[in-house]
Amino acid sequence: MGILELPAPLFASLDQFMAVGILATVRLIIWGSIGAVVTMGLYKLFSPQAKIGHAKRAAQAARRRLYEFDGELADAGPLIRGQFIAAFKHIGLVVPASLLAMFPLLCLLVWLDTTYGQSNVAYLPVGPEWGRSWMAVFFPVMVMVSLLIYRWARIE
């Protein structure tokens, strides 16, 4: 059992509990929502939101200064350098929290593929066979819920 499979018994017990009265497709919708809430919650909790907001504004200001520059390309070097510095600072602030928030999602994805991906069950009633898999249900739900949380919680 690998490290990504450690929470599998917890996922399996929750899924068995839900399976009593909920269809597999609806359970995948629930898992997508849970994945989004946990991932976005961990990201907001562990990311320096104020610093990220400041870095975003600094990067935007650097882009604006470069866009408004009306001189020779040789003279734009400091502006280009400032834009790259601001962009990489933003990336440096975002990546550690993103990696931390992604770990539970990776565990969930491994379990979902093991549980729902090993059969030829169609989880959606229409569309091509490849579009009826568990991923076609899980990922759109997770993306939509993540975007809603991102806007609602004002995550930077």
Image (cartoon, helix red, strand yellow):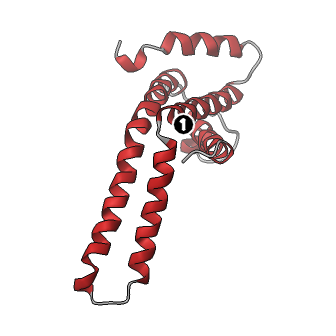
Q: Is residue 71 above or below residue 57?
A: below
Q: Quadrant of the N terminus?
A: top left
The residue that disc 1 covers is 44
List the single residue furthest toward the left.
Answer: 74
The x, y position of residue 141, in whole percent, is 64, 40
Query: Image quarter for residue 27?
Result: top right
* Relative to 40, 144 lies left or right: right
- Taking the spot 59% from the left edge, 44% from the top edge, the residue there is 143
The x, y position of residue 121, in whole percent, is 60, 29
Judge by depth and name the residue closer to the eye, 40 or 84. 84
* Relative to 122, 6 lies left or right: left
The x, y position of residue 7, in whole percent, is 48, 14
- Taking the spot 60% from the left edge, 39% from the top edge, the residue there is 142
Query: Image quarter for residue 23?
Result: top right
* Crowd band around label 1 with a 10 angstrom C-alpha radius: few (<14), some (14–19), many (20+): some
- Taking the spot 48% from the left edge, 54% from the top edge, the residue there is 54
The x, y position of residue 77, in whole percent, is 25, 76
- Taking the spot 37% from the left edge, 59% from the top edge, the residue there is 87
Three-letter amino acid code at disc 1?
Lys
Judge by depth and name the residue closer to the eye, 140 or 88. 88
Q: Secondary structure at mark 1?
A: helix
* Relative to 13, 68 lies left or right: left
Judge by depth and name the residue closer to the eye, 30 or 36. 36
Query: Image quarter for residue 155?
Result: top right
